[in-house]
Image: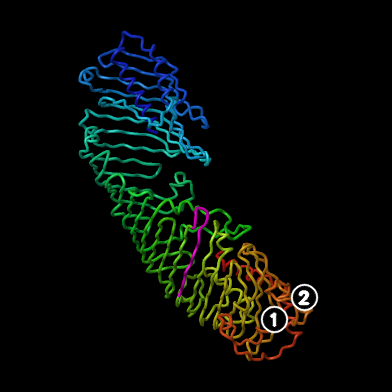
Amino acid sequence: MKKLIYIIGLLSFLTVIGLVGFIATLEVNQYKPILIDKVSEHTGREFNIEGDLEVIPSLSPTIAMTGITLGNANWGTNNNLLDVGRIEAKVSLIPLLSGKIQVNNFILHDTSVFLEKNDDGHGNWIFESNQSTTGTQETDETTLPPISIEDVEIQNVLVSYRELTDESLVEFRLREFTTSVTGLDSPLSFGMEANYNEVPLSISGTIGSLDSLTSGADFPIDISGNLGELIFNSNGSLTNLPDSPSGSIAFDLQIDSLADMNSLADAQLPDQGPLKIAGTLTLSGLDKINIDDINLLLGDLKITGTIGVSTASEIPQITANLQSDVLDLTPFMGEENKEEVEFLFSRDALPLETLSSINAHINYITSRIVTPSIELSENKLSINLNNGNLELSNRAVVAGGNLAAALNLDAINNNQVKLTTRITGEDIMLELLPHEQDLWFTGGATNMSINGSGSGTTVAEIMGSFNGSFLVNIGEATMPNSNIEMFGADIIFSTINKLNPLSSQEDTSLLECAVVNLSVNDGMINLDRQIAIQTSKMYMVGSGEINLKNEEINIGVRPYAKEGVGLNLSSIAGAAKIGGTLANPQAEFDAANAVKTGLSAGAAVATGGLSLLAQGLFSKAGTDPAPCNTALGIAPQTSAQPSQSQGAESQAIEENAGNTDVVDDVKSTIKGLFGR
């Protein structure tokens, strides 16, 4: 890139120098071949000037060149790196006598610069000289005399950038750029009209003098403009330019709606606004930048704090301390994607290289976070990223209880990470969770924990090697016998209602307990009555297997009446089998096999047999008066169930075999458990 700048500067310099010796008397075009050869030799690229060198003699003579081209790298996709339509300069003769170059007017028209990187990350602006090397680093010993430029006119300049590994092309088209200055010690005013891709960009303002830029004196900045619908302003001053800049610049940005930035962000942002961002940018040398007094307003959202960036070490460091009152994420969370996919866990490689590319320490405190399904208050989030190790911890109050989460993502090497999770929830009350229904829970103190770890290069590999546990334990609650919408677990309670014979007769049911206790061993979940739900009238238990490696499911759930409640088994829906995969679970009733075996035989669910009425599963369930304790690993006290007619239960299963509502709810339960 330095050589490219050098070439443009050399062309401008030679344009100016040509005025000195060849004003009107010499044929300057005789030197054009020499100039072409020198630039070609210096860059190792083909260089050409198609037009003649033009000289317009006067007290401020003008020299111009047209049709300038510089070839691209041999691997490049475009013929030329640089195309210049016309370049000219009008120079004052008197300052030349004292060794200074004063350009009264500089013009650059119809220019294209095409920048790109190859698969190895090499830029086409890096030149390989045709000159033989002796092992010493190439140096440019040319020293240019002092140059001052008063007026600049640039029109129709296109700068394009592309990486061969990425099909996207970034274009910056400078339609017009003009400057005005009365002297080296005077402020410089400028105006620019351009396009970033297809988004219009307009900037104007005044900055410090050229003398202050090169001497390190105070350099004021007052710039404003717009990028599409985004309006921005900045005002401040810097010193010690360009080697060790320091100082501060106040800035503000505003836009009526986030949706107005869709074309710029290449995304579908919600129609939320207005957005206003203000702060102070502080520089302390070339390697330290702070953004202080941040004030971000987006509708009712207000975020304040500071952000710092340091590049003093090999790995850049970001620090941030942010606060807000309410963070409402509802507008940014679109509708659930109901499109069926083959796998629930992504098979795409994780961007592991980013873990080692930056270090970060971020703290965020907010009074309340709002989502469509849950609210968190007194939230304290901490993110630490250090040498490829990401630690995320969060503490919050949820529905009157406490939630603590800690995730650790450690880069084992460039191709693999280890994920460790530690999540606990205590005394989270179902009755305090967000809801829209008139009938809702009362009570329902819930404790939960998710602990374990897995490793791999994709989410699928991490889950396929996961070792740990998942526990949800819900205490006594009054539960509505209607459809419940509640953060995934809604399907579980809806399934209870479908299997409950009294759900259509009563508005509520008394939930005594509900337990989901999963143990994961190398991506395998084996259930032996580790799913249990107990109401005042009935039980529901589940056993089976979930394979997180291939995402296959084989689970059975079956309700049965509590002793002494007066329920006839013929009124209770039959058992259900859930198969398929986590992404596409399939549920069915096993009515035919139940009748044939008389509820006393069949393959065990955990072995993948078709019958869910296996003797080993449901004979135990039928004698367990405390299935929640059994699910928690507490040994049950067995008691005989009242005898029921085998024919009555068989008839009930046959009658409910076509109950598609139950099948659909049980199927959706699995998706709810895994976040779909």
The image shows residue 361 at horizontal and vertical percentages of 37, 58
Q: Which quadrant is home to the N terminus?
A: top left
Vertical placement of 478 versus 668: above or below?
below
Q: CA distance from mark 2 to mark 1?
A: 19 Å
Q: Quadrant of residue 580?
A: bottom right
Amino acid type of the residue that numbered disc 1 sits on in the rendered structure: Gly
SS of the residue under disc 2: helix
Q: Main secondary structure of the magenta part?
A: strand
Could you tell which of marks 2 and 1 lies nearer the N-terminus?
2
Magenta stretch in the rendered image: 412-425
Disc 1 is placed on an element classified as helix
Residue 332 is inside the magenta segment: no
Residue linked to disc 1 = 616
Q: Is residue 484 left or right of residue 329?
A: right
Residue carrying label 2: 592
Name the outermost residue toward the top. 25
Residue 108: where, in percent of width, then height?
A: 37, 25
> Which quadrant holds residue 194?
top left
Disc 2 crowd rating (10 Å Cα; few below 14, some 14-19, many 20+) is: few
